């Protein structure tokens, strides 16, 4: 029974068991989670930003032991079936940014490309950190890079480009 729950959460409801592009589908779960969160909180207020930050940190903290357990259950380091890291990383990609559809799509694309390419220090996290820390934190670093790029694009084009 424990293995069922580990697989359920590590694979985001078995989305990670899709035999192709499981990371992409895991990120789509993250998009849905971010939209649901954005529905209930207003990130334009200080209170909303605080709640979003707490939710993001909690998801990251919970995803590390779940990913560690997932590696044990799946008997593979950073199994492609473990996609909780992709879902959680999207919270970081969109951290304190408005959820305009065009901006979310661009965030999704940047998140996926940077997660696949793993620009340092993301690759270092993946290779040097143990178990769930390596599984999750490489995606978080890539998501921070995505967030920075989104902010740069917004700075260069303006929010009106995305509304």
Image (cartoon, rainbow, N blue to C red):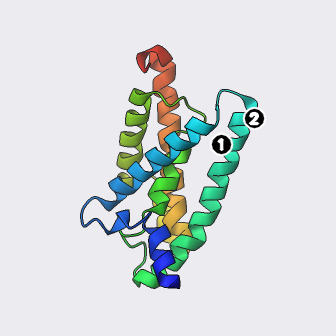
Image side of residue 81 versus residue 50, left or right: left
How far across and how far down the image is residue 20, in percent?
24, 62
| Residue at which label 1 appears | 52
Question: Does residue 95 appear in the picture of this structure?
Answer: no
The residue lying toward the viewer, choosing from 145 and 112, is 112
Please say if 77 is above or below 41: below
Which label was assigned to residue 80? none
Q: Quadrant of residue 7?
A: bottom left
Crowding at dot 1, Cα within 10 Å, few <14 / some 14-19 / many 20+, comes out as: many
The residue lying toward the viewer, choosing from 97 and 1, is 1
| Residue at which label 2 appears | 47
Mark 1 lies on a secondary structure that is: helix
Instruction: Give the residue at the far left of this rendering.
Output: 20
Q: Residue at x 47, y 54 (%)?
A: 87
Image side of residue 1 versus residue 27, left or right: right
Q: Quadrant of residue 44?
A: top right
Q: Residue at x 42, y 65 (%)?
A: 13
Mark 2 lies on a secondary structure that is: helix
Question: Does residue 152 appear in the picture of this structure?
Answer: yes
Q: Residue at x 41, y 29 (%)?
A: 101
How far across and how far down the image is residue 155, in percent?
51, 20
Quadrant where the C terminus is found in the figure? top left
């Amino acid at each position: 029974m424990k293995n069922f729950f580990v697989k359920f959460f590590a694979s985001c409801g078995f989305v990670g068991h899709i035999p192709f592009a499981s990371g992409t589908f895991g990120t789509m779960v993250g998009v849905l989670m971010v939209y649901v969160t954005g529905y209930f909180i207003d990130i334009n207020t200080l209170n909303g930003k605080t709640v979003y930050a707490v939710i993001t940190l909690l998801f990251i903290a919970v995803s590390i032991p779940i990913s560690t357990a997932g590696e044990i259950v799946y008997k593979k380091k950073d199994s492609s079936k473990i996609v909780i890291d992709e879902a959680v990383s999207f919270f970081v990609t969109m951290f304190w940014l408005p959820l305009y559809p065009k901006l979310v799509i661009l965030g999704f694309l940047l998140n996926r490309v940077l997660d696949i390419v793993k620009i340092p220090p993301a690759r270092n996290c993946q290779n040097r950190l143990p178990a769930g820390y390596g599984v999750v934190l490489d995606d978080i670093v890539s998501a921070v890079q995505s967030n920075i790029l989104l902010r740069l694009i917004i700075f260069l084009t303006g929010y009106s480009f995305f509304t």
